Amino acid sequence: MMRKTLLFLTLACASLAYYAYSPLTPEKLPLEFTLNQGSGLSAVARQFERDGLLESPRLFVAFARLLGRAGQIKAGVYQLDQAVSRMELLTMITRGNVSTSRVTIIEGWNFRQLRDALDASPHLRHDTQGLSDSEILQRIGAHESHPEGLFFPETYYIAAGSSDMALLKVAYRLMQQRLDEAWQARSPNLPLETPYQALILASIVEKETGTPGDRPMIAGVFVNRLRIRMMLQTDPTVIYGMGEQFDGNLRRRDLTRDTPYNTYTRGGLPPTPIAMPGRAALQAALHPASTNALYFVARGDGSSHFSSNLNAHNQAVNRYQR
């Protein structure tokens, strides 16, 4: 009798071990699946059956209950990159080993483009949908009244299923940190009174730069103009002020139509940034090149030609633009 019992226990343990550690072979990898908040073990097992991971949901439920893990399911987005055993699968979903996703904020994006990208991301929980820009700023604890330029361009690694609001809060705080660091180390005697003005200038430099090496010179041109109270006359600010009216072509009449962002009709900096500047643009705005240049024109290859007077600038325009 004892031998039969031992044999039965041995076979039972062997069967359990085989069930627990034999590999599952989904039809395709990688396989991503989402477990919603409050999902019960039975519902999760049936989902795995639909995904082609399990043949018997009831057996998996019994297995999890036997190990005392039935009530430990963690919500989130998971990804399988290779075959796993049932034990590994159960450990993954009870420890909350959710997949990590990348979300990249691009230098030069405006806030509308950022919101569109977040809304389109399948890896985020979309808590900002339906909220106004001001409501978002309030919820992330921002003290500014306008969202433009406040979020640092970077690639963020987040747990899939995280809130887009949480991502914005992290990007906002990182921009505040980077801006403060750059402001504290700024060159002396700049015609900028606040870090926010530096952010505005950096956003213009970001949008005007075609070749990274030109950033300090472009910043130097705008700093020189600010010092002598010359109009900035920069097209990207005009385009930003036109909003959805901009159809891809900037016309002469657009340069004379007054808006708060038209730097052909209004002196000084525009009221807010026009895009999200990266670290290099912040550095250029606060460490501009020492130059006597007041003008620049695109050469057509991404780089710019700089001039110190209007006559030389007009000659450069004729050479490169006409």
Image (cartoon, helix red, strand yellow):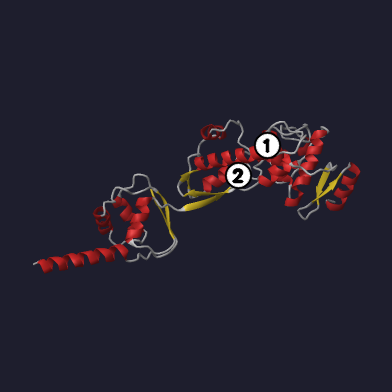
* Residue 292 pos. (x, y %): 85, 42
The quarter of the image holding the N terminus is: bottom left
* Residue 242 pos. (x, y %): 69, 38
The residue tagged 1 is 184
Residue at (56, 45) in percent of width and height:
116
Residue at (81, 47) in percent of width and height:
297
Mark 2 residue type: Gln
Residue 48, quarter of the rendered image: bottom left
Q: Is residue 189 left or right of residue 313?
A: left
* Residue 43 pos. (x, y %): 31, 51
* Residue 183 pos. (x, y %): 68, 37
In this view, 322 is above or below 240: below
In this view, 169 is above or below 9: above
Mark 1 touching mark 2, by CB under 8 A? Answer: no
In this view, 252 is above or below 135: below
The residue tagged 2 is 113
Mark 1 residue type: Gln
Mark 2 falls on what kind of element?
Answer: helix
Mark 1 falls on what kind of element?
Answer: helix
- Label 2: how many Cα within 10 Å (few below 14, some 14–19, many 20+): some
Q: Is residue 149 left or right of residue 253?
A: left
Residue 116 visible within the image: yes
Identify the disc placed on residue 24: none
Judging depth in this view, the residue of 162 and 282 nearest the camera is 282
